[in-house]
Image: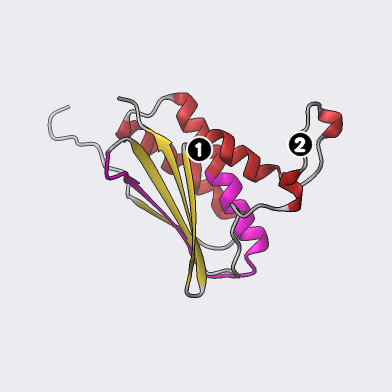
Amino acid sequence: MPGEHTVKPQPRLTLQGQLGELARVWPWIEALASEYSIPAGTQFAIQLCLEEALSNIVRHGQSDQPITVDCARSAANRELMFTLEDHGPAFDPLAPSEFEKTPAPTSIDQLQVGGQGIRLMRRFAGSLAYQRLPGGNRLTIGFALPR
């Protein structure tokens, strides 16, 4: 309709350190998916990885400070990058842990509670990077953009 315009999604989402705030992530991702023509499978991967990382930040970060999630295209324009920053204690989710040295479960009976989130993120994300910040953490998760 003439005069109507589509509102571009904001490139930054700021969440408070509460699990209820995670409900705001899905609509934001849907808006970004529309803006960047992201296929449903990639949209699912983004949702899965962001919810896993954010829920861990909220549950284990011991901080009531805001969490920011920034979205931007990579310099080569091949990935959509999500950068999560929090003010919690140092935690490098990409550092090898004893849990990750065990083989991945081959059946539901072998599945252990906890520790599967990093495996999920490594499986569904195109790239992962961690950086310790003064007083916080930065996790960057990349997903391939359609060509």
Q: Position of residue 68 (x, y in %)?
A: 44, 59
Query: Of 137 and 98, which appears nearest the observer?
Result: 98
Tell me the quarter of the image containing the N terminus. Answer: top left
57 within the magenta span: yes
Q: Nearer the viewer, residue 58 or 129?
A: 129
Q: Which mark is residue 143?
A: none
Task: Determine whether label 2 and label 1 are within 8 Å by CB.
Answer: no
Quarter in which the C terminus is drawn:
top left
Q: Residue furthest bottom?
A: 135
SS at mark 2?
loop
Classify mark 1: helix, strand or loop.
loop
Q: Residue beneath label 1, please?
A: 125
Which corner quadrant of the image does residue 88 belong to? bottom right
Residue range in magenta is 50-76
At a point 81% along the width and 36% down the height, the residue shown is 111
Determine which of the numbered discs, if any, sits on residue 103 in the image.
2
Q: Amino acid at mark 1?
A: Ala
Q: Nearer the viewer, mark 2 or mark 1?
A: 2
Please give left or right for residue 43 compared with residue 119 in the image. left
Mark 2 residue type: Pro
Residue 108 percent across, percent down from the top left: 81, 29
Is 147 colored magenta in this rendering? no
**As drawn, which residue projects farthest toward the left?**
2
As rendered, which of 105 and 66 lies closer to the eye? 105
Q: Residues within 10 Å of mark 2 (few under 14, many from 20)?
A: few
Position above or below: 81 against 3: below
Q: Residue at x 26, y 41 (%)?
A: 7
Who comes first in sequence, dot 2 or dot 1? 2
| Residue sitting at x 56%, y 50% | 22
Task: Measure the C-alpha gap from mark 2 to mark 1.
Answer: 20 Å
Above or below: residue 90 compared with residue 96: below
